[in-house]
Image: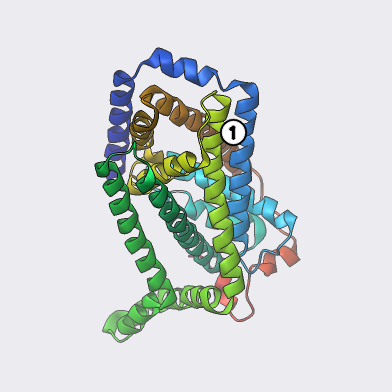
Amino acid sequence: MARLLALLLGLALLGFIASQADLAEVWAAMRGIGFLGVLAVLAIFMAAFVVDSASWQLMLPSARLECVWLLRLTKVRAVGEALNLVVPAGSLGGEPAKAWLLKRLHGIGYREAAASLIMAKTVNLLALIAFCAVGLFLIWREPRLTDAFRMAVAVGLGVLALGVFGFYAVQYCRAASRLARLVAGWRFAAALERYLAHIHDVDDRFRAFYGARRGRFALALLLALVNWTINMAEVYAILWFLGQPITWAEAWAIETAAQLVRAGAFFIPGSLGASEAVMVVIFDALSGRPALGLAVALIRRGREAVWIAWGLGLGWLYSVTPASLPAAVATRGKSPSNPADSSKP
């Protein structure tokens, strides 16, 4: 119910923004992107999506570092991210679907899948902090932005960094396993033995990736940062095709503000309304054309809609296709040291 109310809040905010905008000017700006611009935006987002999938691939020991596996994971992510955007469950609605598809289609156990998804989210957010730190520096140097706007961005980045580093510390320090050992001493712990084993195993995977596989961790973090940079390039490209070119510093500042708002409005499906609002505010400050900001936001929504359609289409196709795994693939998701890895979550 809370998620549905958040969706209604987002729709109300979007409706308010539309009522205050010059829709004729917004439409005129959007039409200027042209067919080549649409293709460029889709290609840029596809590049970012593939890079992000490659970052995730490094966290899955059962997924070999080859193009075939990269394609498989890209399609699985497409389904999950589509669900993340349309299901009123924050940004977590598609994560169980990703784990289920990895198990059903590629024989990767639920424990490995769950650990990789948590690590992928963590690495993505750590890279976002680094990206936004540069953006905050550029925002602070931009004289057209108000002190209130700069301070809001700084506070938002601080809150995000505190939460993400805390989440990373919980994984690295095996906090869940420590809690599980404490619970194990209770009288009813025998009934929870199976779940405690899951917790210990997933924590072992966290420690192995962050500690023993530091090269993969560093590369995954670098790829996640490249992903955010490509997203920034999308803003630059949209405005270039609209005939309103900006500098790379301005594009970085705009994307920083947009991503911080999306992170803060995670409880609204797709950050509906919130993303449009921040684009209107920052474009009003930078160019005096809030309608241009709304046009850019709506173009990105259109690209998002194409991606949602592709992801949901793949999900439907997978749901009606019988799983057929070769024995070698089916066993690849099991670790010799973790024979229960393929058990149900």
Is the residue 314 above or below the residue 295 in the image?
Answer: below
Is the residue 179 above or below the residue 6 in the image?
Answer: below
Residue 213 position within the rendered picture, expressed as x and y whole percent measured from the top left: 59, 75
247 and 123: which is toward the camera? 247
Looking at the rendered image, the quarter that the N terminus falls into is top left
Taking 74 as reference, is 29 left or right? left
Identity of the residue furthest to the top in this view? 24
Give the crowd class for mark 1: few <14, some 14-19, many >=20 residues within 10 Å: many
Taking 2 as reference, is 228 left or right? right
Residue beneath the point at 36% across and 30% down: 280
Residue beneath the point at 59% across and 44% down: 319
Taking 73 as reference, is 157 left or right? left
33 and 334: which is toward the camera? 33
Residue 51 visible somewhere in the drawing: yes
Going by the numbered disc 1, the residue's amino acid type is: Val
Q: Residue 312, located in which quarter of the rendered image? A: top right
Residue 321 position within the rendered picture, expressed as x and y whole percent measured from the top left: 66, 45
Residue 110 position within the rendered picture, expressed as x and y whole percent measured from the top left: 54, 65
From the image, tell me which residue sits under label 1. 41
Q: Secondary structure at mark 1?
A: helix
